[in-house]
Image (cartoon, rainbow, N blue to C red):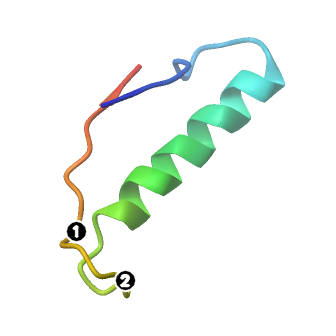
């Protein structure tokens, strides 16, 4: 589980953090990424 800022934040660092977290969730779930463990199933809470 990942807790992060919501998309309606006014601070530019918070918005950037949200974008980074969303990308990380996407890439962690890709089965094509080379890793020893199976793909992750992550749920983001905003």
Residue 12 is left or right of residue 36, and the answer is right
Residue 43 is left or right of residue 33, and the answer is left
Secondary structure of the residue carrying numbered label 1:
loop
Name the residue at 71% across, 37% down. Answer: 16
Q: CA distance from mark 2 to mark 1?
A: 8 Å
Q: Tell me: residue 1, above or below residue 37.
A: above
Residue carrying label 2 = 33
Rendering quarter of residue 3: top left
- The quadrant of the image that shows the C terminus is top left
Residue 20, x across and y down, in percent: 61, 47
Rendering quarter of residue 2: top left
Residue 11 is left or right of residue 8, and the answer is right
Name the residue at 79% across, 15% down. Answer: 11
Residue 45, x across and y down, in percent: 34, 23
Name the residue at 66% across, 34% down. Answer: 17
Residue carrying label 1 = 39
- The quadrant of the image that shows the N terminus is top left
Q: Marks 1 and 2: in contact by CB < 8 Å?
A: yes
């Amino acid at each position: 589980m990942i807790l992060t800022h919501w998309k309606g934040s006014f601070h530019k660092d918070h918005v950037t953090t949200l974008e980074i977290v969303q990308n990380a969730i996407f890439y962690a779930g890709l089965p094509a990424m080379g890793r020893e463990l199976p793909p992750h199933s992550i749920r983001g809470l905003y």
